[in-house]
């Protein structure tokens, strides 16, 4: 019997958080693998009372199609090692099952379509995309800065922090209302576009952050045309961007 206490400072201990994360990842991977094997084995043993054994190839192909649809695309499913021979064969199976048109995946999707919208971040993104990278403040940032600047310029005896705070709160409330109206119109446009996709039968939701003081990096990233792993998400996002004017569009030609 070995009663020795493990020495502190072992390689596992020295790894710290990265090591802990790797152990957790391996444990999750193993648990998911075991669950998948059990589920697929049960499916493979399923027999119809008249027609006999399950068409397991069809079953597996449809399961993978549902996974790809919920992730957004075939390529998103294979992103871990897209150039491997396994990925090539799975790609052939998926494309043979659902076709090559991204819209064909819609009927297989089982997870809701969730779109995250940070209105203030969207306003900031419009400045980042301007020619020459001439980044400017958003209309809200400009207006709130003017309030603080105006009070900073007052003589000390005329400065009233309560008045400054009240004016700033009024500006914030005004732009919160504008952001809220934009989020409502954006959501309506997304849902209208989703209704045009006849095979899409899962809920479509827009989760909006309408806080004018939200940081430009708060929350999940917006869809990116350079990484369109979810063409359906990108289609809905672009449809709303095209037809819904940004808040303060008249004085802010984004």
Image (spheres, rainbow, N blue to C red):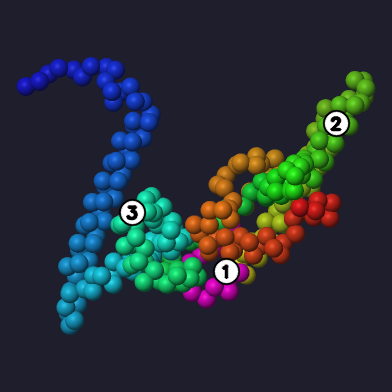
> Is residue 225 visible in the rendered structure shown here?
yes
Which quadrant would residue 196 be assigned to in this image? bottom right
Q: Secondary structure at mark 1?
A: helix
The magenta stretch spans residue 58: no
The magenta stretch spans residue 196: yes
Question: Disc 2 marks which residue?
Answer: 149
Measured as percent of width and height from the top left, residue 181 is found at 72, 57
Q: Secondary structure at mark 2?
A: helix
Residue 234 located left or right of residue 101: right
Measured as percent of width and height from the top left, residue 220 is found at 55, 47
**Mark 3 or mark 1: which is in front?**
3
Task: State the residue at coordinates (30%, 35%).
Answer: 23
Task: State the residue at coordinates (6%, 22%).
Answer: 1
Q: Secondary structure at mark 3?
A: loop
The answer to which of marks 2 and 1 sits earlier in the sequence is 2
Quick check: 121 above or below 230?
A: above
Question: Local crowd at mark 2 within 10 Å, few (<14), some, or many (≥20)?
Answer: few
Task: State the residue at coordinates (21%, 73%).
Answer: 54
The answer to which of marks 3 and 2 sits earlier in the sequence is 3
Question: Disc 1 marks which residue?
Answer: 194
Which quadrant would residue 173 be assigned to in this image? top right
Measured as percent of width and height from the top left, residue 92 is found at 35, 66
Image: magenta residue range: 193-206
* Residue 181, label in figure: none
Question: Disc 3 marks which residue?
Answer: 84
The answer to which of marks 3 and 1 sits earlier in the sequence is 3
Quick check: 218 above or below 185?
A: above
Residue 134 located left or right of residue 188: right
């Amino acid at each position: 019997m070995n009663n020795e206490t493990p020495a502190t400072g072992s390689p596992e201990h020295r790894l710290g958080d990265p090591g802990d994360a790797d152990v957790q990842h391996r444990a999750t991977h193993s648990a998911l693998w075991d669950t998948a094997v059990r589920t697929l084995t049960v499916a493979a043993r399923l027999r119809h009372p008249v027609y006999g054994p399950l068409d397991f190839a069809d079953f597996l192909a449809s399961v993978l199609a549902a996974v790809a649809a919920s992730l957004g695309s075939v390529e998103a499913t294979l992103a871990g090692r897209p150039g491997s021979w396994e990925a090539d064969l799975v790609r052939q199976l998926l494309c043979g099952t659902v076709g090559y048109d991204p819209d064909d995946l819609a009927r297989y999707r089982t997870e809701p379509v969730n779109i995250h919208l940070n209105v203030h971040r969207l306003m900031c993104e419009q400045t980042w995309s301007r020619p020459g990278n001439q980044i400017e403040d958003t209309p809200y940032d400009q207006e709130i800065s003017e309030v603080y600047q105006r009070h900073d310029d007052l003589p000390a005896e005329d400065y009233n922090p309560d008045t400054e705070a009240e004016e700033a709160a009024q500006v914030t409330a005004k732009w919160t209302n504008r952001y809220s109206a934009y989020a409502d119109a954006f959501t309506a446009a997304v849902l209208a576009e989703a209704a045009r996709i006849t095979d899409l039968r899962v809920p479509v939701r827009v989760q909006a952050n309408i806080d004018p003081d939200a940081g430009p990096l708060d929350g999940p990233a917006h869809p990116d045309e350079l990484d369109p792993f979810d063409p359906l998400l990108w289609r809905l996002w672009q449809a709303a961007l095209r037809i819904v004017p940004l808040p303060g569009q008249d004085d802010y030609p984004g």
